[in-house]
Amino acid sequence: MQTLKMALKSIKANKIRAFLTMLGIIIGVSSVIVMVAIGQGSTKQVQDQIGSLGTNVLTVTVTGSDVTFKEEDVEQIQAVDGIEEIAPTVSGRVTIKNGRSNVQVSMIGTTSSYLKVRDLQLQSGRFIADLDHENHSKIAVLGSETAQTLFGFGDPVGEYVKVNGTSYKVVGVLESVGSSLGTSGDSTIIVPLSTGQRLASTTTIGTTYVKVENEDMINFISSGIERTMYSIVGDADSYSVSSQKDLMETASSVNETMTLMLGGSAAISLIVGGIGIMNIMLVSVSERTKEIGIRKAIGAKRGNILLQFLIESMVLSSFGGIIGVGIGIVSAQIFTLATGTAITYSVSVMLLSFAFSLLVGVLFGVFPANKASKLDPIQALRYE
C-alpha cells in the first residue's frame, strides 16, 4: 500500500506527463473495443438478415451461362421427398414509371408459392395467383420502397404503372423486409413467372427457392436436389444448392476474420503505448536517481526499488486501460447513433483489453524498474 501511495503521488506530481503517457494505452484499448463492437455487430446483423429468410429454405441457383433450366425441370425438383413448397424465379432490372415518377428496380418473375416460401407479408391487395401465370397477366406486386417512390403515401392497388413502357396493373404491395447483405429487398417489383420471362427475355429459371417440410432433414433433401440437378444439367459446376445456414456460416467466418484483423490493428496502439510508458519510466529513473540512492542508503533492498517502479508502470497502464474502456464504450455508441450501424459489446473483449494493457505495463515497466534497482547507492547519492 505504501508503494502504491508513492506511485500515485509521483503520478499526481506530473499530471500532464502521466496523461500523455497513458494516451497510447487509452487509444489502443478504446480502438480495440470500438472495432470489435462494430465487427461483432455486423456479424450479428448479417446472421439475423440471413436467418430471417428462413433456415428451412434451400436456394438452387443455375450458374452456367450455357445451361437451360426450364419450368418443367423445376417440377422434377418438386418430386424430391420432403419438399413443402417450391418457387422458381427469373430476375432482371426494369424501369417503372407512374406519371412523372420513374425508378429502376429489381424485377422478379415467380409463382404464387413465392410469398409463402420467402415468408413475405402483404401490406395491401393480393399476391400473384396461378391463373396470372397461366394467362401471362400484366399485373404486378410492388415492394414497399417502390410503391412509396411511385405513389407517395397513397394506395397503389388498382392503379396502373408502365414497366419498360408497357402498362401493368398493381394488385398488391409487400410489407417492408429491409436490406439483406447490402441489397434492399423493398426496391422490387414481382410479376407472374411467364410475364417475367418475357421482360427478362429468357425462359431459363435462374434461381429456385425450396421450402422443406422438416428443417432437420435439410441436408438429406439438399443431397436429393443435388442428384436431381445433376441428372438435368449434367455438370456439377453449372449449378449450386445452398442453405441459409451455409450462408450464415460463410458470412460469419468472413466477418470474424475482418473483426480479428481490425482488432489486431488496433491492438498495435497498445504496444506503442507500452513503449511510451517504458520511455517515461526511464526518464523517471534518471530524474529520481538521488531519491533511489537515499532509499538504498537507509535500507531499501533491490526488490523494494524494483517493486516501486513496476507498480508505477502498472498504475499508469491500468488507469489508461480503465479510461480506454470507458471511451471505447462511449465512442461505439456515438458511432452507432451517427451511422445507424449495429454494434455488439463484448465483455470478454473489454476485460481482455484491460488485462492486455496491464500486461503491457508490466512488460514495459520491468526494464526501467530493473535499471533503477541496480543503481549503486554511492553513485546515486553523488548524481546531480
Image: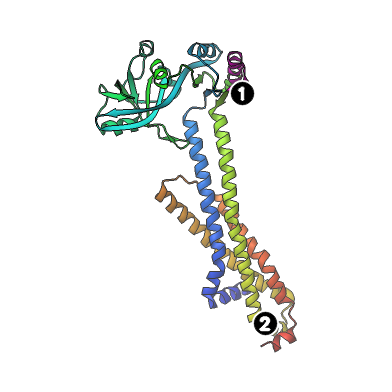
Task: Write down the residue under mark 2.
Answer: 289
Q: Is residue 145 above or below residue 368?
A: above
Q: Residue at x 66, y 70 (%)?
A: 310
Amino acid at circle 1: Asp
Q: Which residues are magenta?
A: 222-238
Q: Main secondary structure of the magenta part?
A: helix
Q: Nearer the viewer, residue 80 or 290?
A: 80
Q: Position of residue 112 (x, y in %)?
A: 40, 17
Task: Write down the residue under mark 1.
Answer: 237
Viewer-nearest of discs 1 and 2: 1
Q: Nearer the viewer, residue 297 or 111?
A: 111
Amino acid at circle 2: Thr
Q: Which image quarter is the N terminus in?
A: bottom right
- Secondary element type, mark 2: helix
- Secondary element type, mark 1: helix
Q: Nearer the viewer, residue 104 or 83?
A: 104
